Amino acid sequence: MTTKPDSPTPAPQVRADSGPREQAFEMCFTSTPRGARLARRLAAVRLDAWGLPYGTEAHDDIVLIVAELTANAVRHGHVPGRDFHLRLHVDAHSGTARVEVTDTRAERLPRRPAAVPNGSGAEEAGRGLLLVSHLATRWDWHPRADGPGKTVWAECAL
């Protein structure tokens, strides 16, 4: 569960019926663990401001997907001197949220997990996309349109 960061002034709450039907946030981040952490935090704050409050299942699922996809971009898509790009889009009309993470490494493509791997369960690595596949309605990847690399995306029903 994500906790709301302490702030001197509370962020204004946006109700789904009072604000725009579509919201989008996008930004480039350094391809480092710190960049992935900042992307996750900013996505959590933005979702809360859009009316998906901290502690709700939808908020926590989307933030976890952002965390996994950005961590993968840093770990598997890192090219020295290149950033990764996060795009978060929430469409209240269709009831979906879409997370897109673009990196610049084209030769390391994600594999779709077929099933929960057998084993002791003690392994920590290699389960990010398996987690995304359980939380998201659907996910996939496609080559980056404007240069080398790929975009991994996931959609969630709200």
Image (tube, grey):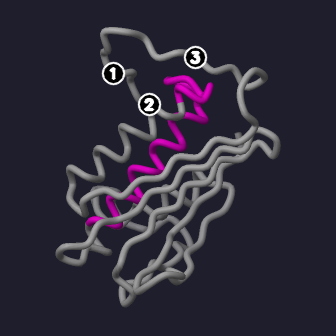
SS for dot 1? loop
Say whether marks 3 and 1 touch (CB < 8 Å).
no
Q: Residue at x 36, y 37 (%)?
A: 41
Looking at this view, is 14 or 156 the one in front? 14
Q: Residue at x 35, y 65 (%)?
A: 84
Q: Are marks 1 and 2 in contact (CB under 8 Å)?
A: yes
In percent of the image, x 25 and y 72: which residue is there? Answer: 82
Cα gap from disc 3 to disc 1, whole angstroms: 15 Å
Q: Which residues are magenta?
A: 48-74
- Name the residue beneath numbered marker 1: 5
On-image quarter of the C terminus: top right
* Residue 116 part of the magenta-drawn span: no
Identify whether 139 is placed above or below 61.
below
The span from disc 1 to disc 2 (Cα, nearest Å) is 8 Å
**Residue drawn 30% across and 74% down?**
76
Place of residue 140 in the rendered image (x, y in percent of width and height, measured from the top left): 59, 72
| Residue count near mark 1 (Cα–Cα under 10 Å), binned few <14, some 14–19, many ≥20 | few
> Which residue is labeled 3 in the image?
13
